[in-house]
Image: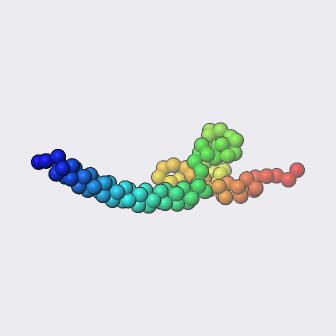
Amino acid sequence: MTTFSFYTYFCIRMMNIEHICSHMLKNVKILLDKNFSVVYNAGMVSSNLMTIEDLADYLKVTRRTIYDWLKHNKIPALKLVGQWRFKKDKIDAWLEGQSQPH
């Protein structure tokens, strides 16, 4: 194999690798765009739901207080796959109902 033919062979191989990499990057971008969209949309749906920790921070109370309210059915909640979740709009309405006139 002469130097020229080796160089030609090398260039052809590099062009193939570049083409393959370019194709793979396009596919990765498509997958990332799809997955990011799913994650983003899931975040939009679940942003209305709070965990016990979120709710404790939101209401400025301890987690123990939240668990006590849950035990005595004092707060609107739902249990999803064994974990408590709270809809922000329901909590806000519940808070309005809890306020007493002065």
Q: Residue at x 33, y 59 (%)?
A: 23
Work out which residue is located at the far right of the displayed protein and give it. 102
Q: Position of residue 10 (x, y in %)?
A: 22, 50
Q: Nearer the viewer, residue 83 or 71?
A: 83
Q: Residue at x 52, y 57 (%)?
A: 40
Q: Nearer the viewer, residue 2 or 67?
A: 2
Residue 22 location, quadrant? bottom left
Q: Taking 1 as reference, is 51 left or right?
A: right
Res. 31 in view: no
Res. 11 in view: yes
Work out which residue is located at the far left of the displayed protein and give it. 1
Residue 32 location, quadrant? bottom left
Q: Position of residue 4 (x, y in %)?
A: 18, 50
Q: Taking 81 as reference, is 71 left or right?
A: right
Q: How many marks?
A: 0
Q: Residue at x 62, y 40 (%)?
A: 63
Q: Position of residue 56 (x, y in %)?
A: 64, 43
Q: Position of residue 26 (x, y in %)?
A: 38, 59
